[in-house]
C-alpha cells in the first residue's frame, strides 16, 4: 500500500490543514530526521481499510523520497472519529523490531459443531523480527480444531528472523468442551460458598467472644 504526502510547514496550523482535507503527520526513525508532512484524509481512510499496524506502508513524499514505514501512532478525535495526527516510523533495515501482529481466524472449528466454545486467547501476538519478515497478520484455519484442542504459539512457523515473545506453549485459540465450562463454573460456586462459610464462622466467633467478655 502507498500513500502520498506533501511537505508541510509547522507555521501552518493543524486546524487549517484539516479544513483542507489533510491530516498532519510526521515521518521519523533511527536514521531519519523528522519530516513533517500532510496526507490526504481520504487516502488515510482507504489505507486503514486494508492494513494493520504490522503492515509495511510506502509513503511517497512530494518532491522527495519514498519511505517504507510502520504506523506507529494514530490520534483520532473521540467524537468525530476523524484523524488528528499520524506517526510513520521508518525502521532500520537490519535491526530487529518488537511489534504486535493481529491474528485472523478463518473457518468454523469442528469442536463447535459438537457443542464446544471457541476461545480466542491471543488476538495479537507480539513478535520480534526483521522489518521485512513481519507479516501484516497471522491467518489461522481452525476448521480441524476439535473439543479440548488448541493451536499454540509454537505451531506457527518461526525462524531466527521472526520470533514470538509469548511462550511457545501458549494457546492462541482453543475449543472448550461443555464439561470444562461446567467444571469451572462449579469450582467458582464452590469457592464462593467456602468464602461465605468462612466469613460466617468468623462473625460467630467474634459474637461469642463479645458475649464472653460481657
Image (cartoon, rainbow, N blue to C red):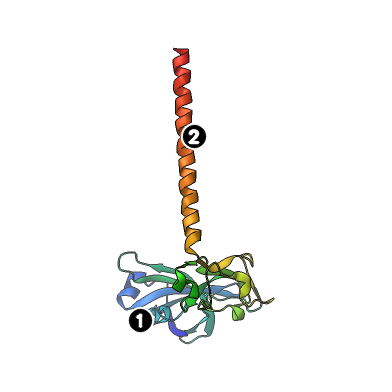
Residue 59 in percent (x, y) is at: 48, 82
| Residue in the image at 48% along x and 30% along y | 201
Secondary structure under tag 2 reads: helix
Q: Which of the 4 image quarters holds residue 163? A: bottom right
- Kindly tell me whether residue 13 is visible in this rendering: no
Which numbered mark, 1 or 2, is in the foreground of this view? 2
Q: Position of residue 44 (x, y in %)?
A: 40, 79
Residue at the (62%, 74%) spot, across then down: 155
Q: Residue 137 appears at what percent x and percent y? A: 52, 77
Which residue is under mark 2?
Answer: 198
191 or 122: nearer the viewer: 191
User: Residue 141 or 190: which is nearer the viewer?
Assistant: 190
Q: Position of residue 165 (x, y in %)?
A: 62, 66
Viewed as shown, does residue 186 lie left or right of 40?
A: right
Crowding near the residue tagged with mark 1, few <14, some 14–19, many ≥20 C-alpha atoms within 10 Å: few
Q: Is residue 58 depicted above or below 213 in this figure? A: below
Depth order, front residue of 47/21: 47
Amino acid at each position: 500500500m502507498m500513500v502520498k504526502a506533501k511537505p508541510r510547514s509547522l507555521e501552518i496550523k493543524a486546524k487549517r490543514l484539516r479544513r483542507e482535507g489533510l491530516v498532519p503527520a510526521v515521518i521519523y526513525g533511527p536514521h531519519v530526521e523528522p519530516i513533517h508532512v500532510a496526507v490526504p484524509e481520504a487516502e488515510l481512510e482507504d489505507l486503514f481499510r486494508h492494513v494493520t499496524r504490522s503492515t509495511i506502508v510506502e509513503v511517497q513524499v512530494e518532491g522527495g523520497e519514498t519511505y517504507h514505514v510502520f504506523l506507529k501512532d494514530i490520534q483520532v478525535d473521540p467524537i468525530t472519529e476523524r484523524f488528528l495526527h499520524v506517526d510513520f516510523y521508518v525502521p532500520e533495515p537490519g535491526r530487529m523490531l518488537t511489534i504486535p501482529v493481529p491474528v485472523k481466524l478463518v473457518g468454523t472449528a469442528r469442536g463447535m459443531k459438537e457443542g464446544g466454545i471457541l476461545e480466542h486467547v491471543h488476538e495479537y501476538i507480539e513478535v520480534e523480527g526483521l522489518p521485512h519478515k513481519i507479516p501484516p497478520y497471522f491467518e489461522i484455519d481452525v476448521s480441524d480444531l476439535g473439543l479440548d484442542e488448541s493451536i499454540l504459539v509454537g505451531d506457527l512457523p518461526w525462524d531466527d528472523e521472526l520470533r514470538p515473545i509469548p511462550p511457545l506453549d501458549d494457546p492462541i485459540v482453543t475449543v472448550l468442551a461443555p464439561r470444562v465450562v461446567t467444571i469451572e463454573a462449579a469450582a467458582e460456586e464452590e469457592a464462593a460458598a467456602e468464602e461465605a462459610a468462612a466469613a460466617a464462622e468468623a462473625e460467630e466467633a467474634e459474637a461469642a467472644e463479645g458475649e464472653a467478655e460481657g
